[in-house]
Image: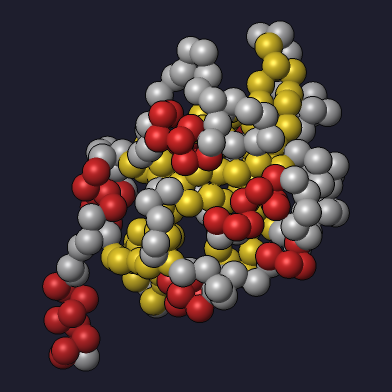
Amino acid sequence: MCYSNSSTSSTQQLAARYRKLVPSKPIELSYYFASGFQFPKWQIVTNDEVLQQMRWGLLPNWYRGGNWMDFASKTLNARIETSHEKASFKHLVERNRCLVPSTGFFEWQTKGKQKTPFFIKDAQYPIFSIAGIHDTWLNPSTGAFERTFTILTTEANALMAEIHNSKKRMPLVLSLDEEEEWLNGRLQFNQIANRDSIQLEAWEINKKIILGPNANSAEVSQKFCNYSSEQRSLFD
């Protein structure tokens, strides 16, 4: 699943990339590493002519519970295969689509008891899009409307199946020519569930950094040579 993402692009860069207008009072949102479980705000692309800012962790407009964080922690991702069935998503998948800009996401590989973190990005473009859906929720404690989103996931392609080898899932990364089609509702799920054509690249990163207090730094996505694992493989 996709619970960790990055977006280091400025508002101006994203506006140029997606041919959108900059909000009148833009708040710069830049993350080298962001955990969905912290419910960060994100620059989001919709059919609106202006870039939007939404919080990660979808809260449907009908939600009236007391602990919104507990609910949102369960809606950070939406499986493409069941999104038409789930109450939180089924009314949004056709009419409330969005693009979640990313400069790379993070996933863990499992080998026995060993877990290794990887950084994954588009092999061609510095900014790429993950398919998402969104909704607007009235926060009863503040009386303010809040916009929230979730990331769609699908079955892993060959690279991601090797990395995310426990669950074999990946975020639904879109190609450039699929972005507008997705937003306009012309792309059906059976057309994009298979991501074998998406070209990604990945490398191991330092576990101490991603698990440490300074994860949100440029160092988190740098390539890491794990000499200890190499030595183990030599002498096993």
- For this rendering, which residue is in front, 1 or 196? 196
Q: Residue at x 21, y 86 (%)?
A: 233
Say left or right for 177 vs 162.
right
Residue 151: % across, % down:
61, 48
Q: Residue at x 57, y 75 (%)?
A: 196
Q: Residue at x 16, y 90 (%)?
A: 235
Looking at the image, which residue sits at the far top? 143
Above-or-below relation of 73 to 199 = above
Asked whether residue 49 appears in the rendered view, the answer is yes
Above-or-below relation of 160 to 51 = below
Residue 36: % across, % down:
51, 41
Say left or right for 129 vs 138.
left
Question: How is the structure coloured here?
Answer: secondary structure
Residue 33: % across, % down:
36, 43
Above-or-below relation of 61 to 112 = above
Say left or right for 180 vs 86.
left
Which quarter of the rendered picture does the C terminus lie within? bottom left
Q: How many marks?
A: 0
- For this rendering, which residue is in front, 66 or 153? 153
Q: Residue at x 69, y 35 (%)?
A: 47
Please identify the quarter of the rendering in which residue 58 is found.
top right
Residue 122: % across, % down:
42, 60
Please identify the quarter of the rendering in which residue 163 is found.
bottom left
Please identify the quarter of the rendering in which residue 172 is found.
bottom right
Above-or-below relation of 145 to 17 = above
Asked whether residue 39 appears in the rendered view, the answer is no
Which quarter of the rendered picture does the N terminus lie within? bottom right
